[in-house]
Image: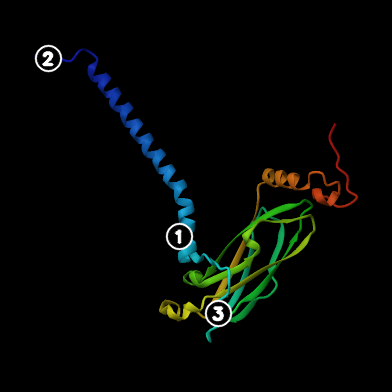
């Protein structure tokens, strides 16, 4: 009758623990891979369905303008790490479904250095996101403001006339469009500004007021 050699159970247990660790490691790596792969899919899902109040992007306005009128209100916020004044120029606009309209947001860099801002956006009620379309928007790209610089950020949009066919949105008379600006990291901002202003001797190109001087510690 065969018998186990001394120490065999301990070796088998060690092998089992090593195999278990290997399997768990593979599972974790797989989950991480899936999570990264899910990001663009999630964004696409939001854009197609309007999930979470995500707005749509359109290349042209509808041919027909409907009779239904919707009030579009505007909201603006900035993150704590971005010292910008950022507010909508108008409180609200009344539009007919299918009618293109334009709103403007005002921004001022209240700091003493150039800053790059990137914005997130959504609409409420969130179920209206699938029918709120932007044609042009400052939110499509990052915005750079020099110290004290003021800028107007426009957004052109329309409410899809198909909204009248969706019984779930019969009660929607007002849609609020909200933006929040965030600052890019200091290191990233400096690198971008350095690349953009390389070879430009003007002090304002480097985010400095004319007449200011750079000092270096010695």
Residue visible at 37% across and 36% down?
Answer: 26
- Reading the chain from its start, which is encountered first: label 3 or label 1? 1
**Circle 1 SS class:** helix
Q: Which residue is tagged 1? A: 45
Q: Name the residue nearer the viewer: 210 or 160.
A: 160
**Circle 3 SS class:** loop
**Residue 89: horizontal and vertical position, in percent?**
70, 72
Residue visible at 79% across and 59% down?
Answer: 149
Image quarter of the N terminus? top left
Q: Residue reaching furthest left? A: 1
Q: Quick check: 164 above or below 149?
A: below
Label count reads 3
In the rendered structure, are the residues bearing label 3 and label 2 in contact, judged by CB atoms less than 8 Å apart?
no
Residue visible at 41% across and 79% down?
Answer: 167
Q: Tell me the quarter of the picture where residue 76 sits.
A: bottom right
- Reading the chain from its start, which is encountered first: label 3 or label 2? 2
Residue visible at 45% across and 54% down?
Answer: 41
Q: Tell me the quarter of the picture where residue 79 sits.
A: bottom right
> How far is mark 3 from mark 1, CA to CA?
26 Å
**Residue 15: horizontal and vertical position, in percent?**
29, 24
Q: Which residue is tagged 2? A: 2
> How far is mark 3 from mark 2, CA to CA?
86 Å
**Circle 2 SS class:** loop
Q: Which residue is tagged 3? A: 63
């Amino acid at each position: 009758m065969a018998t186990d050699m001394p120490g065999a159970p301990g070796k088998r247990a060690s092998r089992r623990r090593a195999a278990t660790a290997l399997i768990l490691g593979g599972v974790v790596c797989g989950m991480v891979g899936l999570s990264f792969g899910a990001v663009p899919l999630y964004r696409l899902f939001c854009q197609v369905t309007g999930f979470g109040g995500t707005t749509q992007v359109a290349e042209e306005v509808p041919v027909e303008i409907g009779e239904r009128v919707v009030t579009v209100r505007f909201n603006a916020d900035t993150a704590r790490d971005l010292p910008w004044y950022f507010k909508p120029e108008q409180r609200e606009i009344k539009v007919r479904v299918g009618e293109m309209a334009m709103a403007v947001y005002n921004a001022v860099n209240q700091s003493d250095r150039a800053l790059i801002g990137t914005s997130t956006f959504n609409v409420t009620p969130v179920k209206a996101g699938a029918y709120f379309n932007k044609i042009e928007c400052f939110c499509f790209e990052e915005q750079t403001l020099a110290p004290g610089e003021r800028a107007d950020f426009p957004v052109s949009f329309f409410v899809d006339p198909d909204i009248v066919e969706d019984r779930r949105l019969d009660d929607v008379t007002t849609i609020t469009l909200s933006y929040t600006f965030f600052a890019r990291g200091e290191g990233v901002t400096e690198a971008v500004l350095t690349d953009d202003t390389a070879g430009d001797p003007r002090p304002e190109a480097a985010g400095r007021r004319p007449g200011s001087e750079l000092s270096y510690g010695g």
